[in-house]
Image (spheres, rainbow, N blue to C red):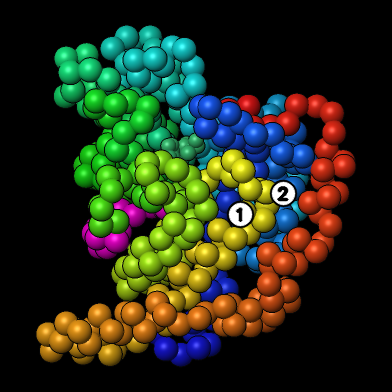
């Protein structure tokens, strides 16, 4: 796409969904570093997400995680979101933080534990109904640590059974997003370890089940953009959990570790129709800001995704196709690299200006005084964190 107004229109319509847990305290198993001004409840998490939206103009949706964001009154939380100019995005289930799930949740050998896990997933569907959320995001920590610990294919049967029950409960405007992850916390087998497993389950379930690609959930060297192209071609790419990794599931800011990889992914998205509204790909972030200030880190992540998208949109697709058809390897690679090496920050600044926003959302937020204000105001109460 080389028509600048079309590129700008695409950038204005891309929605990036931010995660409620990205605004709370988080850390590693070694230490959680508490930060001043961190939200004390889901209402304050939404207020922080509203700041990100106010300065970027493209982040009106927020993913919730249950029970971290459990509230008495979901319609009230939804109204609060609407008052802030937001809407509730994916509902993330949590079947990994309960003693009962030590040996698995929906794949646990004990049917009573499987029932408990599936009931939680159904509760999440109820919360979707109460909040107007269109997406149920499922990530299972299920797996085993030792050879022989459990029956690998038996666990697939149990997984399929639970997924089918939840799928049945979905309404016409609701879908299931199944996330895969190579390892952790299970270290020998994981029950949904890769896109192929997720894809096979989604295919069996039907059109309302699609795959989530979390960019931090692959073995080093995995070609993620291939997976993206394949899933889009099959109509099975439901969403991204964007983040960066250097080692494993690092959950660092999207585009920080490898902006070139993010560009390659966004190229496949653009090329295969993933930015079109009807394809309905949910561009989510799944990140934790352990040592950096959270709201500006989310703003930086959003702008990193936008920069990768802008570069992908600037690829001269006609020149690329011509070079590919003529078998000119160097020319086709050159077309891609020209786009990647373009400084798109002035273009994005113009897009923001046209939306009535500051040209530099990061600087504008820091100058707003909000960070100091929340540090003063949010005293007392328990600060929300990853897992609280
Ligand atoms: C876990 O590794 C996954 O990325 C999930 O998406 C999870 O629900 C999320 O990271 C919050 O912990
Ligand atoms: Zn994730
Ligand atoms: Zn993860």
Residue annotated with mark 1: 298
Q: Quadrant of the N terminus?
A: bottom left
Residue 132 among magenta residues: no
Image point 47% across, 12% down: which residue? Answer: 99
Seen in the picture, residue 54 relative to 89 is either above or below; the reply is below
Q: Quadrant of the C terminus?
A: top right
Seen in the picture, residue 187 relative to 199 is either above or below; the reply is above
Label whose residue precedes the other's in the sequence (2 or 1)? 2
Looking at mark 2, is its residue's CB closer than 8 Å to ligand 1? Answer: no
Work out whether residue 62 or residue 162 is closer to the camera in this orientation and state it.
62
Seen in the picture, residue 181 relative to 17 is either above or below; the reply is above
Q: Position of residue 375 (x, y in %)?
A: 82, 43
Image point 28% across, 48% down: which residue? Answer: 220
Work out whether residue 298 or residue 5 is closer to the camera in this orientation and state it.
298
Image marks 2 and 1: residues in contact by CB distance under 8 Å: yes
The magenta stretch is 225-240
Tag 1, which secondary structure? helix
Q: Residues within 10 Å of mark 2 (few under 14, many from 20)?
A: many
Residue annotated with mark 2: 48
Q: Position of residue 108 (x, y in %)?
A: 32, 16
Tag 2, which secondary structure? helix
Q: Position of residue 132 (x, y in %)?
A: 59, 45
Q: Residues within 10 Å of mark 1 (few under 14, many from 20)?
A: many
Quadrant location of residue 346?
A: bottom right
Residue 60 in view here: no
Residue 50 in view here: yes
* Horizontal relation, residue 90 to residue 147: left or right: right
């Amino acid at each position: 796409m080389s028509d600048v107004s079309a590129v700008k229109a695409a950038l204005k319509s891309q929605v990036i969904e931010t995660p409620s847990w990205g605004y709370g305290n988080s850390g590693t198993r070694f230490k959680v570093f508490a930060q001043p001004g961190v939200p004390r409840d889901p209402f304050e998490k939404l207020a922080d997400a509203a700041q990100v939206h106010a300065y970027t103009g493209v982040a009106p949706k927020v993913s919730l995680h249950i029970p971290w964001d459990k509230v008495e009154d979901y319609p009230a939380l939804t109204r609060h979101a609407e008052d802030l100019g937001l809407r509730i995005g994916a509902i993330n289930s949590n079947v990994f933080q309960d003693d009962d799930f030590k040996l698995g949740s929906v794949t646990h050998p004990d049917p009573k534990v499987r029932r408990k896990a599936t009931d939680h997933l159904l509760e999440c569907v109820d919360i979707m109904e109460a909040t107007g959320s269109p997406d149920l995001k499922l990530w299972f920590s299920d797996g085993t640590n030792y050879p022989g610990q459990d029956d690998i294919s038996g666990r697939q049967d149990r997984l399929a059974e639970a997924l089918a029950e939840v799928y049945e409960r979905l309404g016409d405007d609701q879908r299931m997003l199944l996330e895969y992850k190579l390892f952790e916390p299970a270290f020998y087998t994981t029950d949904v370890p890769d896109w192929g497993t997720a894809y096979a389950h989604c295919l069996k379930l039907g059109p309302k089940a699609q795959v989530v690609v979390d960019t931090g959930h692959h073995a080093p060297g995995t070609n993620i953009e291939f997976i993206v192209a394949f899933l889009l071609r099959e109509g099975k790419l439901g969403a991204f959990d964007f983040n960066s990794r250097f080692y494993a599931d690092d959950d660092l800011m999207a585009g920080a570790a490898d902006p070139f990889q993010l560009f390659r992914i966004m190229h496949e998205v653009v090329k295969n129709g993933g930015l079109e509204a009807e394809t309905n790909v949910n561009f989510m972030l799944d990140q934790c800001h352990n040592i950096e200030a959270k709201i500006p880190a989310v703003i930086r992540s959003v702008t990193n995704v936008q920069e990768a998208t802008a570069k992908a949109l600037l690829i001269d697709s006609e020149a690329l196709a011509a070079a590919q058809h003529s078998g000119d390897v160097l020319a086709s690679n050159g077309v891609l690299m020209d786009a990647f090496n373009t400084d798109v920050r002035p273009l994005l600044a113009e897009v923001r200006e046209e939306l009535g926003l500051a040209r530099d959302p990061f600087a504008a937020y820091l100058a707003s005084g909000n960070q100091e204000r929340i540090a003063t105001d949010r005293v007392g109460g328990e600060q929300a964190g990853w897992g609280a």
